[in-house]
Each structure stands twice: as structure tokens, then as C-alpha cells.
Amino acid sequence: MPQAGPPMLPANYNSNYQILQTPGYVAILVEMIHDARVVPLDGRPHLPQNVRQWLGDSRGHWEGNTLVVDTTNFTDKTNFRGSSENLHIIERFTRADENTLLYQFTIEDPTTWAKPWSVEIPMKKTQGPLYEYACHEGNYGMAGVLAG
């Protein structure tokens, strides 16, 4: 799995997510770097192709009990395993049981890969808050931080 990537690809650490739903939006907060995505659910079209964003332009809708999020319009600086600005991601979030969210995503980028590829990951519910992600320059402060 990648260390980080757009928009919510699982990482090896700090990979906790908080998902909030309101009547017209879903917000996805990632513990790592505190990236937040606000996904409209009202059927609006994607932004024009000339408007590019680091986390892309996400639009969501429901298919039964599955939230489907379609994300396009990444910048050429949004790099996931060599992807280009043609990166297109379809994510599916399905509640499997009380404590499990099934996260599926399909990656497509004809500039980078010969064909789309998909991953399916069960995400288990965790107890407790998301913590602030903070870097310490040179890590000189870590001894004091960890000691309390």
C-alpha cells in the first residue's frame, strides 16, 4: 500500500478516517495530514476540466446502501504511484456490518496504466478521536514529546 495518495487511498500509518454525513454532503477527514474532502451529493456536474485540485473534484451519489464517489480533475502535482493529471478514481463505501465499512476503489489513468485496477479493503471501526498530525523539524523535539 502507498504511504499517501489521493484522495483517500489507504496508507501504512495514520490511516484513520472520519466520515460525516449531512443531508447534501459527505465529508471525509483523513488523520494523516488532515486532508479533508467535502463531497456534494446533489447531482451537480464535475468542475470544468481546466479547474484542477490537489485532491481532485469529487461528486457522490447513493446506489442502494453504497456511497459511490467519482473523483476527477487532479493536478499534475497529485502523484499516486506515477499517475498523471488524467487520474480518475471511483470509490465505493458499503456498510458490511455494525463495525465494518467495505472500501472499494478503482483507479484509471490511461497515461500511466494499460487498464484500470481495483482494490477492496474492509475498514474496521475504531474507538477514540483522530489525532493531530504534526511534523517536528529534524525530529529533535520527539524525545520530549514522547516523554510527556
Image (cartoon, rainbow, N blue to C red):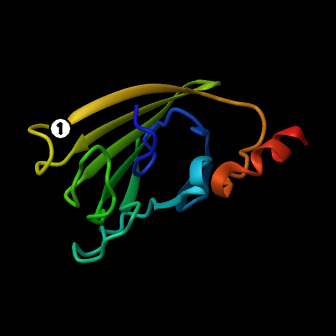
Q: 112 left or right of 91?
A: left
Q: Residue furthest right?
A: 148
Residue drawn at (70%, 30%) of the image: 126
Q: Quadrant of the N terminus?
A: top left
Q: Could you say where residue 148 lies in the image, as x and y percent from the top left? A: 91, 42
For disc 1, the marked residue is 116
Front position in the image: 83 or 95: 83
Element at badge 1?
A: loop
Q: Could you say where residue 72 lies in the image, as x and y percent from the top left? A: 28, 59
Residue drawn at (25%, 52%) of the image: 88
Where 81 sits versus 99, above or below? below
Where 85 sits versus 128, above or below? below
Q: Is residue 138 visible?
A: yes
| Quarter where residue 105 is shown | top left
Amino acid type of the residue that numbered disc 1 sits on in the rendered structure: Pro
Q: Is residue 29 visible?
A: no
| Quarter where residue 51 is shown | bottom left
Where 85 sits versus 117, above or below? below
Where 28 sits versus 120, above or below? below
Front position in the image: 74 or 3: 3
Residue drawn at (31%, 63%) of the image: 77
Q: Could you say where residue 91 lies in the image, as x and y percent from the top left? A: 37, 42
Front position in the image: 140 or 98: 140
